[in-house]
Image (cartoon, grey):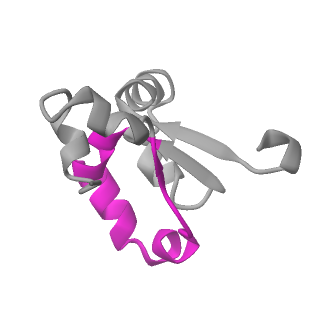
Amino acid sequence: MNELGLITMAINYHTREEALRSRNEELWVTARSTPDIIISGPEQLTSAHFTAALADEKFYNRICGMGIDEVHLMSSWGSNFRKDYQQLRVP
C-alpha cells in the first residue's frame, strides 16, 4: 500500500492508547481526513469515536470499504472467543 502512495492507519485499542498517551491524538478524529485506508479491530465498531466519525460527512463520503482485522477466523474461533466480532453478522 505504501508503495502505491496510499496512507494507511491502524486503529485498535493499542494504537489508540499509544496515540493518546504520546501525542494527545485521537486516531478516529485524525482518520476523518488523513488516511486512504483504515485497518481496524472489531472493538472499534462499537466505540463512540467510530460512531462520531461515521456521523462526520467528510469522513462518511470518503469511505469506500472497510476491513476488520482477523474477521476471516470468526467461524473457526467460535462464538465465545471475541464478542466484538459477532456484531459483524458474518455467516
User: In front here: 35 or 2?
Assistant: 2
Q: How many labels does the image show?
A: 0
In percent of the image, x 53 and y 37: which residue is there?
10
Instruction: Please state if 28 lies on the left or on the right of 85 as rendered.
Output: right
On screen, 57 above or below 47? below
Q: Residue at 29%, 51% (x, y): give it.
A: 45
Q: Would residue 17 appear left or right of 35 to someone viewing this image?
A: left
When asked about the image quadrant of residue 54, the answer is bottom left
Residue range (magenta): 40-68
Residue at the spot 41% in from the left edge and 32% down from the top edge:
16
* Front-lying residue, 23 or 72: 72
Q: Position of residue 82 (x, y in %)?
A: 20, 31
Residue 41: % across, % down: 38, 38
Q: Is residue 91 above or below residue 22?
A: below
What residue is at 45 percent from the left and 53 percent from the top? 29
Rendered view: 51 above or below 55: above
Quarter of the image where the C terminus is located: bottom left
Location of the N terminus (image quadrant): top right
User: What secondary structure do most residues of the magenta stretch adopt?
Assistant: helix
Residue 30 location in percent, x, y?
Answer: 52, 50
Q: Does the magenta stretch include residue 9?
A: no
Where does the image place residue 37, in percent across and percent down from the top left? 62, 52
Q: Quick one: 42 or 44, which is closer to the camera?
A: 42
Left or right of 49 in this view: 38: right
**Residue 84 sits in which quadrant?**
top left
Q: Check the image and report above or below for 75 versus 38.
A: above
